[in-house]
């Protein structure tokens, strides 16, 4: 019916590339009740901002796409070197492909959203200092360092701390 409303040549211009856009990955990646460990590999601890506003506690990590790509490439090489090809390696590779969609000077942000309040509560129940005790970025970096050095104990320590912390958050999902 569009030919009755606009010329075919204009329709062709408007719809050019639409088929390419339909296959594109969204600009926002989301997960429920957990932040995948690979997402933390994009950031350094000093890129983290924590605080409280009218919506409650928050934790946001922000860096350039260029830095995120470089770090994720190292994580990918490290995981591939330690474990070979597999599901974890493929997930990191997909993250790299997603990052490649954006200009290197763009920013990428990881926002805990409402999970910040749950994480704070869970950490306090565990006897820690709440959200300020969250070392998820550091734990992923420790795990990757252990893998790179061939130190399974170090790699396992970082991963176990990370997974234990986020299991606390996931436990709130079943309580709701």
Image (tube, rainbow, N blue to C red):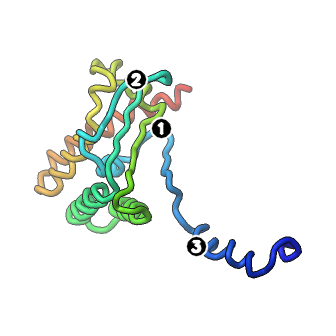
Q: Which residue is mark 2?
A: 52
Q: Which residue is mark 3?
A: 20
* 166 vs 131: above or below: below
Quadrant position of residue 90: bottom left
- Which residue is more in the foreground, 17 or 119? 17
- For the point 38% across and 51% down, the residue is 107
* 38 vs 134: above or below: below
- Residue 74 lies, in percent from the top left, at 23, 60
Find residue 143 and name its label: none
- Residue 26 lies, in percent from the top left, at 53, 57
Quadrant position of residue 62: top left
Q: Are marks 3 and 2 in contact (CB under 8 Å)?
A: no
Q: CA distance from mark 3 to mark 2?
A: 41 Å
Secondary element at image label 2: strand
- Residue 146 lies, in percent from the top left, at 15, 51
Q: Decide: few, some or many residues near mark 3? Use Cα within 10 Å; few <14, some 14-19, many ≥20.
A: few
Q: Which residue is mark 1?
A: 33
Q: CA distance from mark 1 to mark 2?
A: 20 Å
């Amino acid at each position: 019916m569009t030919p009755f409303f606009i010329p075919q040549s204009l329709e062709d211009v408007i719809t050019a590339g639409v088929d390419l856009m339909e296959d594109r990955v969204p600009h926002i990646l989301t997960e429920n009740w957990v932040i995948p460990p690979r997402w933390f590999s994009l950031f350094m601890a000093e890129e983290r901002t924590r605080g409280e506003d009218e919506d409650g506690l928050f934790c946001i990590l922000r860096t350039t796409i260029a830095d995120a790509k470089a770090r994720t490439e190292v994580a990918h090489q490290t995981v591939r070197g330690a474990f070979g090809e597999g599901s974890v390696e493929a997930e990191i590779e997909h993250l790299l492909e997603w990052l490649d969609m954006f200009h290197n000077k763009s920013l990428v942000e990881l926002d805990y959203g409402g999970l910040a309040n749950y994480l704070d509560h869970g950490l306090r129940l565990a006897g820690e200092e709440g959200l300020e005790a969250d070392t998820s970025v550091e734990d992923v970096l420790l795990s990757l360092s252990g893998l790179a050095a061939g130190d399974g104990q170090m790699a396992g320590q970082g991963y176990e701390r990370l997974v234990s912390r986020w299991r606390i958050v996931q436990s709130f999902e079943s309580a709701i």
